[in-house]
Image: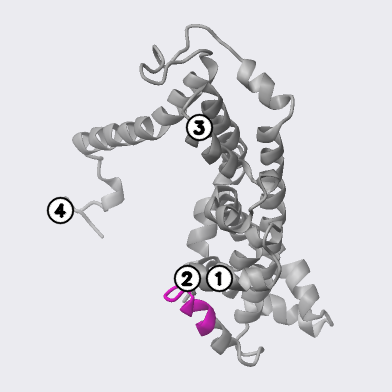
């Protein structure tokens, strides 16, 4: 496509005003997103704090790490953090195993009888859900109340993530998998040694989706875990805030946020590649 001057659009010099507007908008978005985190961090490091007045500035005048030292010595917050890490790690692994294996079968519709029906049933969950009460009754009848499995099994396969992974698997050339089958490889071997290594991008992205969802899930713990000793970090934080806002709450917010934030830099390069590659073929 050519511009009015006859040159390709990609050779046109960008409009300075548009570039400046984009930079300003991006800076505003960054400030709006980063400010709450910096504010809470300042509160947690500021020692004594009056919730009616707030901190004197974004940089605390006196650095005080006593709250963090108290958390690291052990207690409810550290235990709940360990619970959240364990549930997130196990839940993400289980979700990925179930999602990738199901997506592989559904990506081979010509080889797996009834796969289209199963796919339509999975997609129907994007439009219709059972609701809170039926789901609770199922979890209760399965004996999963006050069990960490209740935080994992009900959301074990997300239809949205399933579609992304399936579409990515469909983009893998059939010649590669067919050649392996002709050489004597079983479908399990094809899935494990060919499909999965070629799908690292989408696996990383979907694992991130599952991990963030499990880590941030407060409602499941609220309705399924009646034993406070089993609470994850989100439930402990909510209980602390009900007793009033203080420096300890701010420190708990930081402790609950940092672990999942640290995962993003390692998976950032996979985000665009994984999502777009899984959405090309329909």
Q: Nearer the viewer, residue 98 or 12?
A: 98
Mark 2 and mark 1: Cα distance apart in space: 6 Å
Q: Residue furthest left?
A: 4
Mark nearest the camera among 3 and 4 is 3
In the rendered image, residue 202, in percent from the top left (x then y), is placed at: 59, 60
Numbered mark located on residue 122 in the image? none
Find residue 237 and report its image quarter.
top right
Mark nearest the camera among 2 and 4 is 2
Mark 3 and mark 1: Cα distance apart in space: 30 Å
What residue does disc 2 label? 131
Sequence-first tag of 3 and 1: 1
Mark 2 and mark 4: Cα distance apart in space: 56 Å
Looking at the image, which residue is at 26% across and 60% down? 1
The span picked out in magenta is 120-129
Numbered mark located on residue 243 in the image? 3
What residue does disc 1 label? 135
Q: Would residue 183 be seen by someone viewing this image from the given angle?
A: yes
Dot 3 falls on a residue whose secondary structure is loop
């Amino acid at each position: 496509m050519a511009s009015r001057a006859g040159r390709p659009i990609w050779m046109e010099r960008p409009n300075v005003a548009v570039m400046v507007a984009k930079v300003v908008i991006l800076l505003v978005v960054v400030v709006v997103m980063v400010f709450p985190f910096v504010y809470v961090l300042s509160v947690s490091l500021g020692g004594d704090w009056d919730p009616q007045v707030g901190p004197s500035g974004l940089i605390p005048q006196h650095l005080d790490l006593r709250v963090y030292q108290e958390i690291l010595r052990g207690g409810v917050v550290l235990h709940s953090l360990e619970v959240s890490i364990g549930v997130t790690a196990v839940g993400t692994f289980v979700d990925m195993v179930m999602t990738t294996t199901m997506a592989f079968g559904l990506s081979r519709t010509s080889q797996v009888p009834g796969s289209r029906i199963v796919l339509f049933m999975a997609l129907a969950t994007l439009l219709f859900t059972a609701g809170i009460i039926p789901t609770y009754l199922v979890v209760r009848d399965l004996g999963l109340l006050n069990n960490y499995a209740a935080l994992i099994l009900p959301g074990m396969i997300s239809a949205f993530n399933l579609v992304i992974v399936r579409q990515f698997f469909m983009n893998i050339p059939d010649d590669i998998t067919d050649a392996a089958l002709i050489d004597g490889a079983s479908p399990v071997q094809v899935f494990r040694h060919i499909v999965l290594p070629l799908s690292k991008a989408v696996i990383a992205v979907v694992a991130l989706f599952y991990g963030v969802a499990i880590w941030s899930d407060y409602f499941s713990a609220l309705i399924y875990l009646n034993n406070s000793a089993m609470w994850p970090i989100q439930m402990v934080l909510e209980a602390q805030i009900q007793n009033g806002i203080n420096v300890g709450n701010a420190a708990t917010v930081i402790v609950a946020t940092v672990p999942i934030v640290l995962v993003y830099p390692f998976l950032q390069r996979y985000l665009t590649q994984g999502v777009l590659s899984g959405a090309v073929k329909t």
